[in-house]
């Protein structure tokens, strides 16, 4: 190999190394490796219980971004990974928006306790009832509103029991478990997505989510 070819070859190798370093740095900036994965014991979970990939959403029913994530990103994950048995998906309540977040969390835990099969319909119906983002700060989560949502989305749920749980903290123990997980994992914003112990910096970066899942499936 002559000197010119050696120089060219060296430059190519150098360029490849730089590309690998830049890619690695980009990936690292998009995610954080946690010391452990959040426990999903007794958490609402959809998908194959034995799936090797566990996706956890830390979400708040008062959060407009959580609603958007559920409409834009979740359906893709459900179709490609959850419905096919490759991943399971769990939801953990976050109380960043105060009492309304608490009321919705109490209600969702009550529905899950009474009729787990109804949980996801009720869950989606709460987000569907969320007003436009510009009205985000207006109070809309009330006991009456949650009962109205449950009546149409969770017909097997005892509405009297649901009302009792909402108004008298009947499912507060589970809500506090969720809150302890939020504190344990130092959840910075909602939605926060964790996949097998990897926390995404941008929950709307579907390619990054897909990349992590595919890596875990190898």
Image (tube, rainbow, N blue to C red):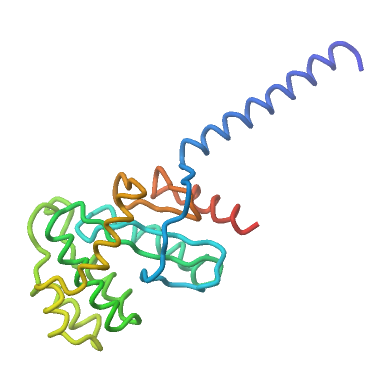
Query: x and y percent of residue 58 in the render?
Result: 33, 56
Residue at 90% x, 13% y is 2
Residue at 37% x, 58% y is 57
Query: x and y percent of residue 72 in the render?
Result: 37, 58
Residue at 28% x, 70% y is 123
> In the displayed structure, does residue 32 sit left or right of residue 11?
left
> In the displayed structure, does residue 162 sit left or right of residue 79?
left
Above or below, comparing residue 194 to residue 18 in the picture: below
Query: x and y percent of residue 32 in the render?
Result: 46, 42
Q: Quadrant of residue 21?
A: top right
Above or below, comparing residue 170 to residue 196 in the picture: below
Residue at the limit of the structure toward the top, as seen here: 3
Q: Nearer the viewer, residue 130 or 188?
A: 188
> In the displayed structure, does residue 171 sit left or right of residue 206?
left
Q: Nearer the viewer, residue 160 or 153?
A: 160
Q: Quadrant of residue 144?
A: bottom left
Query: x and y percent of residue 161 in the render?
Result: 16, 83
Q: Nearer the viewer, residue 24 or 58?
A: 58
Q: Quadrant of the N terminus?
A: top right
> In the displayed structure, does residue 106 sit left or right of residue 216?
left
Q: Quadrant of the C terminus?
A: bottom right
Residue at 36% x, 69% y is 43
């Amino acid at each position: 190999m002559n000197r010119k070819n050696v120089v060219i070859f060296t430059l190519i190798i150098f360029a490849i190394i730089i590309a690998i370093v830049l890619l690695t740095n980009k990936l690292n900036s998009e995610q954080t490796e946690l010391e452990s994965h959040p426990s999903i014991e007794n958490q609402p979970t959809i998908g194959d219980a034995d799936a090797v990939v566990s996706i956890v959403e830390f979400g708040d029913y008062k959060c407009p971004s959580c609603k958007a994530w559920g409409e834009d990103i979740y359906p893709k994950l459900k179709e490609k990974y959850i419905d096919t048995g490759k991943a399971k998906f769990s939801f953990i309540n976050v109380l960043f928006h105060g009492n309304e977040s608490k009321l919705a969390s109490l209600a969702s835990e009550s529905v899950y306790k009474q009729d787990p099969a109804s949980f996801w319909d009720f869950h989606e119906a709460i987000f569907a009832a969320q007003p436009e983002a510009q009205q985000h700060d207006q109070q809309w989560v009330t006991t009456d509103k949650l009962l109205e949502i449950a009546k149409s989305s969770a017909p097997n749920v005892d509405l009297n029991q649901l009302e009792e749980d909402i108004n008298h903290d009947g499912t507060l123990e589970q809500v506090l478990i969720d809150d302890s997980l939020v504190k344990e994992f130092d959840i910075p914003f909602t939605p926060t997505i964790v996949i097998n112990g990897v926390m995404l910096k941008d929950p709307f970066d579907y390619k990054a989510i897909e990349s992590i899942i595919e890596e875990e499936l190898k």
